[in-house]
Image (cartoon, rainbow, N blue to C red):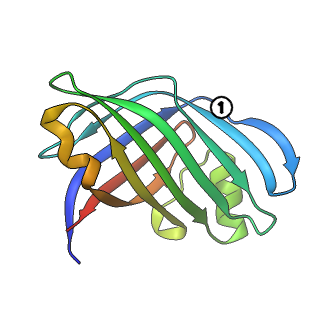
Amino acid sequence: MNLEPLATFHVELDPILDLGDTPWGRRRVINIVGGSFEGARLAGTVLPGGADWQVLHADGMASIDTRYTLRTHDGAHLYISTSGVRHGPAPVMERLSRGEPVDPDEYYFRLFCRFETGDARYLWLNRTLAVASGSRTANAVRYDACTLT
């Protein structure tokens, strides 16, 4: 397997909506309000309206589960879903939860990305798997996605 750079994503977020403790952990919903993505074969804007339906586990790990819509620079609409994990030492994760700047090398944030579209120009994405390394700020997520070739 090889990794080929796909795009860098900047996803802007609303504040966390805490739904409380569930049998799986603390359920949080984080609405997606916009953003952008840029790469050699894929660029455009993140449309508002999706969310991260996240679970925060007792050990501090967050299970990531996002679904949202992208609009490419040439007008195609793409569905993206990501699943992944974010974890690190408790003091680091506490700083992150307070919205403080944290070096992404201090914690683990990895995603698996799937795409779906009916636009003929981007049908290749329907058959493409991507992985990403991410970072979190107070009101956004940034991740670099690479396709698995």
Instruction: Give the residue drawn at x 64%, y 64%.
Output: 92
Nearer to the camera, 53 or 91: 53
Q: Amino acid at mark 1?
A: Pro
Seen in the image, is 85 located left or right of residue 29? left
Q: Position of residue 25 (x, y in %)?
A: 81, 56
Q: In the image, is residue 108 above or below residue 83? A: below
Residue at 40%, 41% (x, y): give it. 80
- Quarter of the view holding residue 2: bottom left
Q: Which residue is mark 1?
A: 15
* Residue occupying the point 66% across, 55% down: 95
Image quarter of the N terminus: bottom left
- What residue is rendered at 87% in x and 56% in y? 23
Residue extending furthest toward the bottom? 1
> How many marks can you see?
1
Q: Quadrant of residue 13?
A: top right
Q: Provide residue 68's location: percent of width, then percent of height.
A: 46, 34
